[in-house]
Image: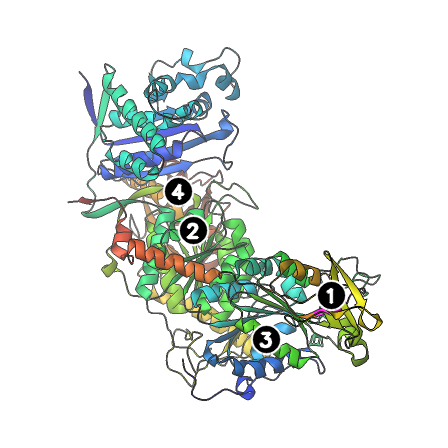
Amino acid sequence: MKETKTLSKVTIHFAGDSGDGIQLAGAQFASTTALAGNDLSTFPDFPAEIRAPIGTTAGVSGFQINFGSEEIHTPGGRPDVLVAMNAAAYKKNFANLKPAGVVIVDPAGFDKKNLRLAGYDDEENPLLNKPSDYQFYEIEVTRLNRDAMKDVDIAPRDRDRSRNMFVLGFIYFLYNRNLEVTLHFLEEKFKHKPAVLEANSKALKAGYNYGDTIEAITRYRIEKAKLPPGEYRNVTGNQALALGLIAAAKKSGLELFYGSYPITPASDILHELAARKNYGVKTFQAEDEIAAITAAIGASFGGALGVTGTSGPGMALKTEALGLAMMLELPLVVINVQRGGPSTGLPTKTEQSDLMQAVYGRNGETPIPVIAASSPSDCFRAAYEATRIALEHMTPVILLSDGYIANSSEPWLFPKAASLAEIKPPIRTKSGDFLPYERDAKEVREWALPGTPGLEHRLGGLEKEDKTGNVSYDPENHELMVKIRARKVALVAKDYPKTELLQGVEGAKLLILGWGNTKGAIQVAVSQALAQGLSVAQLHLHHLNPLPEDLGSLLESFERVLIPELNNGQLVRIIRDKYLVKADVLDKIKGQPFLAEEILDRIKKLLKDGDGN
Amino acid sequence: MEMETKLTARDLSSDQEVKWCPGCGDYSILKQMQSVVPELGIAREDIVFISGIGCSSRFPYYMNTYGMHSIHGRAPAVATGLKIANPDLSIWVITGDGDGLSIGGNHLIHLLRRNVDLNVLLFNNQIYGLTKGQYSPTSEMGKKTKSSPLGSVDHPFNPLALALGADATFVARSIDRDPKHMREILTASNKHKGTSFIEVYQNCNVFNDGTFLNFSDKKLKDAFVLMLEEGQPLIFDQGKKGIRLNGLKPEIVNLEEGASANDLWIHDSKDPTKAYILSRFFDENFPRAFGIIYQEDRNTYEDVLMDQLDQAKGAMGEGDLDDLIRGKRSWTVE
Ligand code: SF4
């Protein structure tokens, strides 16, 4: 008889070699779990190398998922369950497992060679000395999976490649999931490779059936989460960005042009968009980052919605062109999916260290609006908002996402197309009496497209005369134009909704102010602090430049402000500079997102000991 | 759109004062462009000039069409994006030897291989003019300038060979001092579907005066200029000399001393091997070739892209936004 226990929340960490298919198994578990009605959050974490040294801890790829019948805001802290495909995966992750947690291992991954590569001493094998308070499932995945492959027509060297599906099948059994989503996914993916399809489907089913055959196993049930009613889908940050761009282009009646050069972790946006040609999306894989943005500027000049996407190093290369776009006053969306820096830095790790670059990093007085996404599904809103500002204010806009948001997924209560706000670009159709740099009350100029008779004009990066746009070196005019461009960007803040606290009340002792991917972790930490009776509140910024006009007065009502950031303190400097408030930073620069407990600890320290450090 | 009245060269001239140095070769190129454009049958609003940075790149300001004076070296990329956004436009990239071959060299070669349907005019004056006289990537070795007081140690680019190496589909050379020839080449480049690359020898009379004297001086040019004409033998020096091919080796023969005109190399701009040899007429031993060195028909980038879009729409139907947002798997929470 198998027992079934009901749980409200579980965190599973899948870990294996980077060639073990961990990301795929994790993503499948997430899709299935989302469809089963749980709330969830995921965190894929993998090495930068395509095939990092096999069997070593440096080559371990991880995928963590936190799911439950309650609301989930983070991928979870310490996991309840660790799936370790080899000794290195075990070594890297065991210490982090919750006490009395569950461990699922394949002993074949703990042979002499694997133990040595993982850095265990001679004769040391953790499976021979298992801590008794943990629950171990030692499953001979490799052997059982090879048995399952017996009648499948694949090369011997390929038969172990479906081990990830075997393990996934077993976990599906453990958590009472059905196989349908993954079977369907495999059918799509291996449409043209029947043998590979058969191998993977068989492995998945074999893993599931294995769970069914072993005795005395406890299964778990996680009830559906009580989410707001409506239609949901699972979505990653990069997917949501792509969708937001297409939606915004459609709603503004423009074609979407996406120029990009492949770079981790932004390339998936290019892949998503390249597959949407039936939506009229034109993607251009440029020869370099500079061509990607300047082609997007050319497309915008021609009347398309020009967009380019990249990550930190690519952003550095685009800097000069950003200045050009600002001078031309053409719409442009520039996405920076931030990663660990500086220079090439940590390509697959997350960081929020390009905020200063986005707000300030250009030659000359070059104000550009900056928007940040705070979660995978929020990327849709952020892309839509960035596009709206770019088009309605005739300006380049920088959208900051990051590696964590880009690859993670969560359920998304998605909007109906009809409910999305209209976007109205100021396209000029009337010919005659046209001055390219005449402006409306918001300092926005009109967009005259090549091909329109009577509006012929020349744009350029040289300073231009007010209204006419002719080249001008006049000192008075230069100062005037710098001030006009600054005011134009400042006026973008007039469109913002009222700034509201997410939790807590004005006048609390401590405000936790966040931006970007820290939202979920702060949410959990602040709600726990409030439950403990602490005087704390949460505010999250989506617009980083210009900052909301009502932010200053709101900040003043708090005794102290704490800003958790995955950098060495960037927003905190902007806030201090602008509002002269007492703000402290909680920094973390480890390529990993915050854990809620790290923020909670600091809140307690600040409020109980009055000591922020 | 139909034009009611034919444009004149005056209609093409903008209200901005032209600010090149007096005597600069750029004036002649501008003039030829302004007189050729009305003959092309293209509405003024459909014409766009895109440039980078440098003396030549001020060009768009002087044309009363749409235009953009972009940033250093990037005009080919800007123009590519513009053409993809609106394939109906007639786009002219104006660049120079520094802009197009140094800082923007990467964009230029990728434009050529992609074969986006637009025209590139590379004003080659073999010097940096706007920054007041440093050697450029086309300056000859040993050239003494402010930045090379003992002579340049850089081996120069051969722009036509570079263009051919990048698989350009239209490669030509002209010179500021031969207006008629330039008009012919501009007209032919407009006709060509694909990227047309035209190198224009342009005299910078302030920082590099006379560098192309061999090809413009009345007395000298006969011996140094080889005017290419499709289907005609390669003859120069007022009919006195010709060029024939011995295998793949070109030889100059003297037609006055008994060589037969029947043995001469006949210009065939569709022949890539001959085009390559012509592009290597780059030293004192051979006359410099002017005219269309090479042309071929090849699909343009934007045509293939538009075909893909049409096919995708045909196969999957015009995309519905709600379907897209919903994705393949959604579920409903009651
Ligand atoms: S510096 Fe040379 S190229 Fe530039 S405008 Fe003067 S003459 Fe012409």
Q: Which quadrant is home to the N terminus of chain A?
A: top left
Amino acid at dot 3 = Leu
Residue of label 2: A270
x and y percentages locating residue A352 in the rendered image = 46, 47
| Residue A200 against residue B42 in the figure, above or below | above
Describe residue B82's horizontal placement relative to residue B296 as left or right. left
Q: Foreground: A213 or B332?
A: A213
| Disc 2: residue Cβ within 8 A of ligand 1's nearest atom | no
Q: Are marks 1 and 4 in contact (CB under 8 Å)?
A: no
The magenta region covers B284-289
Describe residue A335's horizontal placement relative to residue A181 as left or right. right
- To which quarter of the image does residue A196 belong? top left
Q: Quadrant of ligand 1?
A: bottom right
Q: Residue at x 46, y 72 (%)?
A: B89
> What is the C-alpha distance between the residues marked 1 and 4?
68 Å
> What is the C-alpha distance between the residues marked 4 and 3?
50 Å
Q: Judge whether residue B286 is colored magenta.
A: yes
